[in-house]
Image (spheres, grey):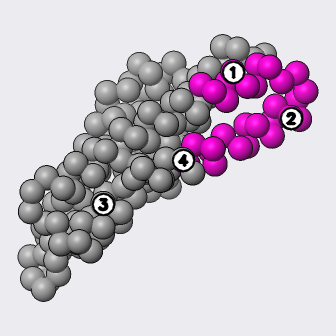
Amino acid sequence: AIECRRDFRPIAGLSVILVLLTAIALGFVFHALIPSLDILLAIALGAILSPTDAVATSIVKRLGISRRVVTMLDGESLLNDATSLVILRTMVAAAAVGAASGGGPIMAFVWGGIVASVVGAIIGRLALRLRTLIGHSPANTAVGFVVPFAAYLPTEYPGGSGLVAAVVAGIVTGQGAARRFS
């Protein structure tokens, strides 16, 4: 948890910016190879292929790479799939309504990330407060299992990414639990 906070910038860069740039670059390649493919759908296809695989992270661990690099890759692997899914959903929705021009898809992507981060952080903090009030260990564990769903569902309604919200709630809960619980 402390390592993830220390390396937040590189993790965010790898999991959001790099995935976004890779999806866009792959989208332009697909569009150039198949001109009849709409550019938004080509970027959606690029989003499917852009995140690194968790298998690559496990291979790096076995190679004896430094702990900091492994921590950054672990943090990145938590969020890159979520970023990819937000890009995919945004591009498919934009293609469905024909919103290739303007900042519609970009604003939808930003909005999805902001809503998910805010809702996930709020649910994570509420879960921590609730779990401090519960003295029964099995009930406390059951609340821990419910947190991702509690973050996912309300995030999807206003157009956010439920997956990103679940990850953020998990990070907030995990970091807070290390300080609050034995």
Residue 158 drawn in magenta: no
The residue at which mark 4 appears reads as 154
Q: Label 2, label 3: how many angstroms apart (C-alpha)?
A: 37 Å
Q: For mark 4, does the 10 Å Cα neighbourhood hold few (<14), some (14 to 19), or many (20 or more) residues? A: some
Q: Quadrant of the N terminus?
A: top right
Q: Label 2, label 4: how many angstroms apart (C-alpha)?
A: 23 Å
Q: Position of residue 96 (x, y in %)?
A: 26, 74
Q: Label 4, label 3: how many angstroms apart (C-alpha)?
A: 18 Å
Mark 2 or mark 3: whose residue is earlier in sequence: 3
Residue 83's place in the image compared with 36, above or below, is: above
Q: Which mark is residue 139?
A: 2
> Which residue does the image show at 49% across and 47% down from the upper left?
155
Span highlighted in magenta in the image: 125-152
Q: Hey, which residue is sitting farthest front in the picture?
A: 158
The residue at which mark 3 appears reads as 90
Q: Label 2, label 1: how many angstroms apart (C-alpha)?
A: 14 Å
Three-letter amino acid code of the residue under disc 1: Arg
- Visible in this render: residue 178? yes
